[in-house]
Image (cartoon, rainbow, N blue to C red):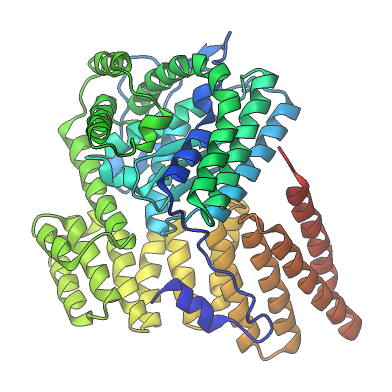
Amino acid sequence: MNRSNHHACLTTEFIKNTIDKRQGLVLTCPLVLLALISSLSIQAYAQPMTNAHTTKVSTPAALATTNYGSWQPSRAQELKLPSLQGQGLSFADQYQTKLLGEWSLQNINGRIKMEHDPWIQETIKDMTWRMNAQVRQQAPLALVIIDNPSINAFAAPGGVIGVNTGTILAANSMDELASVIAHEVAHVSQRHYESGADERKKALLMQIGGMLAAIAASAVDGDAAAAVMMGSQTATMNSSMAFSRSNEREADRVGMQIMNQAGYDPRAMPRFFATMNQKSQLNQVENQFLPSFVRSHPLSNERLSDTQSRAQRYPPLSLNQQQRHQALFDLLYWRVQVMGQHASETSLTTAAKNSIGAKLALMYWYGEQQRFDDAETLMTEFQRLTAAKRQALEPLLSITYSQVLSEQGKWQQAVDVLQAQQRLYPERRDLRLYLAEALTQNNQPTQAQTLLKPLTQQQPSDRYAWQSLQLANEKIAKTATSSSVADIATINALRYRSYDQLWNARYESALTSLTQAKQLAEKMQASTQSSSARPLLANIVQEIKNVKTAKDYKP
């Protein structure tokens, strides 16, 4: 069942007609997408850092193992990077960079269609965090996966790293995809934004503002968007392009080192660049737009030659590593295809003959089409696999089957399937989110809330978790036998909705939700003299202050 349908079903009379859509504005103008990346990839135009201390970085043991085994780093070459200690920025600079990153993330969320599937998010996030850990103590602020077929990736100040679904589908392997993300992680780790001169910083901030304005303009007039984009870039392009080649070469070099340390194949970087170069040449002949990644990360012949030369210095991965990477990429590729509705029944059934990932995607597709007998037939085939082969598909196999069961309203069975996996992988965000949804639908919203709260504490910008918490509290409010429990759940549902609205840059809506929550809490306190309303009110007052601070922030 579609998540939005769940949302509609659970809205209570307390707050009906106030539920917001998960997706932001869908971009329709290709030029605006170019504006997005040209502006967000500001690290390509900033001055490279100087006098950096260097250190050898070892792969943390905690990152060495995943469901697909371990990636052992090669010792063929030491990783020379800025010191992990201090990060070279004052506390004030770090705070300002954090605010800028949060502002960028909120506005990106509010204007671009995202791919929110938790398993896809978890898979790309695991890769990104693994590589980021080689060079930075701080985790990225956020990973955003943009639901768009163009080939693109970007990094923004504060550690916001983004990749288009088109980039995933254009790659031929997990290592090629890793090469793109490693390049962006390198831009962040080398502080290609933070190390710029103050004047250049101000100019680049204007670029970000221009990019967001262009996205908003595209909803009305594509030509207006182009004009806004050109105006925001012209002032900065000439003064900053001199640094772009240096930064791009450094990001390539450091990105390869990051890949090697994290257990990916650095040789994949020139392979992916060659693919992009081929596409750009073809597009020039046919008078089409260049791939956005090429626009924001210019691929000169010198740069291509340099990456090819550097790649040869690294040893190839072992056959075992290659197979594990490729098995995961097969699952990822087809999951992106089916979740983005890019795959037809014909393409899925044809590919399923040789691809486990396509067969899993086909099972999901059958569930979406209400063809449950066909989905069960495929599940029977999966159950005939050896235990080792089935385990290699987890947790996606259980996730997909639970979604087929959910489509049939078999919530208890879905809960049982997901709980078995969640016990094995309690740290996985995706399993918590899928299980929480099934628990809420199965009239167990309190258990769902227990699973979800740690996610928002770990990642305050996790909109999916905030929305799931809202749904759980709406369910509690609807089914509670106690009026005070129902009132508290309603207040919390409004609070959690405000967090989703905050991270969607809908500040006025967030303030409205919190004002409603505050009024209910004050009424509750006055009528019952309940002590539980007092801490709620204190939280709401602080949350209102936080939203006002975010609303008033202007880079």
Above or below for 416 versus 82: below
The residue shown at (46%, 42%) is 162
Residue 59: horizontal and vertical position, in percent?
41, 28
**In the picture provided, is 37 more to the left or to the right than 553?**
left
Residue 75: horizontal and vertical position, in percent?
32, 18
Q: In which quadrant of the rendered image does the N terminus lie?
A: bottom left
**In the picture provided, is 212 more to the left or to the right than 298?**
right
Q: In which quadrant of the rendered image does the C terminus lie?
A: top right
Near-viewer residue (286 or 370): 286
Residue 188: horizontal and vertical position, in percent?
52, 28
Above or below for 241 versus 6: above
Q: To which quarter of the image does residue 391 belong?
A: bottom left
**In the picture provided, is 411 more to the left or to the right than 443?**
left
Above or below for 392 versus 533: above
Q: Can residue 426 be seen?
A: no
The residue shown at (41%, 38%) is 153
Above or below for 302 versus 476: above
